[in-house]
Structures are given as C-alpha cells and as structure tokens.
Image: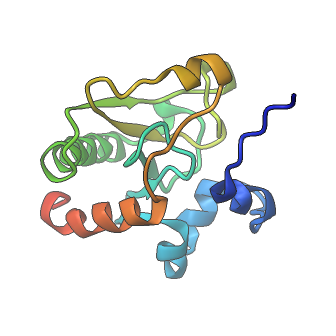
Amino acid sequence: MEDILYAPWRDEYVTGEKIDGCVFCHISTHEKDDVKLHVLYRDEHCFIVMNRYPYTPGHFMIIPHLHTDKLEELSTETWLHMAKLAQQGVRLLKEGFGAQGVNIGMNLGKAGGAGIAEHIHMHLVPRWERDTNFITSTAQTRVYSTDFEKIYNKIKSLVPKYITI
C-alpha cells in the first residue's frame, strides 16, 4: 500500500509564480505587492514578512533591505534596528498572538543551514508547550493546524500596536 499525504495548500508552491533572483530583494523592492507577498511591516532599514513555509503558525522573518550574506557587513544602525524589531516582534507574538515562548535565530550561509543563504534574515518562531509532534520526526512533514492567510491577517492587525519604531 502506498502512503499519500494530501496537502492542497502546497499547490501554490508547485504551481505559483517563480521569482528570478533573490526572493528577499524581490519583496524588498515590490512594496505595492506587500499583501500578496505577506509583508507585515517595512521601513527604510528592514521589512518583516511571514515565512511562507513556517515551522509553526505565526513564524515570520526580519530582513534587511541590503542584499548580503554577511552579518558582519550590516551597518551597526541596521543591526540595532533589527534587534529592536525583534524585541517588539517577540512582544507581539507573546502578548498579541498568545505564544508561550519564541525561538529567534539566524542561519548564516548554506553550511549554517540557511534556506536562502544569499540574503541574511532573522527568524521569529512562536512556540507553545507541547507544540512538537511526532510527524516531523518520523515523516519529515510539518502539520500546520490553521489557515496561513488567517494568521497573516491576525498578525498584520497587531503590527500597529506592537511595532512602534
């Protein structure tokens, strides 16, 4: 018997529009498409975007507009700005979204585990007690328990209250 995992929400990944070049630079330069691209916030230094293939519901990333794969090339001003956004993002996830904890991380370079290694980005991953489940370990598959668009709209509605730079 063949096991089949039906995941219709992934159809867009296979059939959707392909972006040439750096996906983060594309998002950075296409402000008019913020809703389509699931941007939560942007300013002159960075933007915040939902992770389209998240570890948990509400997983988003803080990304500098500067295209670089080297953290050490960021200006101190941009790095401190990202840190401030991370603090506010954690507050948003805990107080506004109900997360019991948050993982923050950056995977620098392909060898460091970065899926998009050419443009640094910081992950904020909301966590809840007992949110792990066996299917990730046994089937290398994540279970996403809620609608992505619903989560995007919820978090987007919280941004004006929590992201105040």
Considering every residue shown, the one lying at the far bottom of the view is: 32
Is residue 113 visible in the rendered image? The answer is: yes
Colour mapping: rainbow
User: Residue 142 falls in which quadrant of the image?
Assistant: top right
Is residue 44 visible in the rendered image? The answer is: no
Q: Is residue 43 left or right of residue 87?
A: right
Q: Which one is in front, 103 or 62?
A: 103
Percent of width and height locating residue 145: 44, 46
Percent of width and height locating residue 152: 39, 63
Which residue occupies 63% across, 17% down?
A: 138
Considering every residue shown, the one lying at the far right of the view is: 1
Q: Which one is in front, 157 or 69?
A: 157
Which residue occupies 54% across, 74% down?
A: 36
**Placement of 91 over or under 38, stated as above or below:** above
Q: Is residue 34 left or right of residue 136?
A: left
Q: Is residue 99 left or right of residue 52?
A: left
**Placement of 50 over or under 33, stated as above or below:** above
Which residue occupies 56% across, 27% down?
A: 108
Percent of width and height locating residue 125: 37, 37
Q: Which one is in front, 117 or 147?
A: 147
Q: Quick one: quadrant of the N terminus?
A: top right
Which residue occupies 27% across, 39% down?
A: 83
Considering every residue shown, the one lying at the far front of the view is: 1
**Placement of 98 over or under 155, stated as above or below:** above
Q: Quick one: quadrant of the C terminus?
A: bottom left
Percent of width and height locating residue 41: 35, 64
Q: Which one is in front, 116 or 81?
A: 116
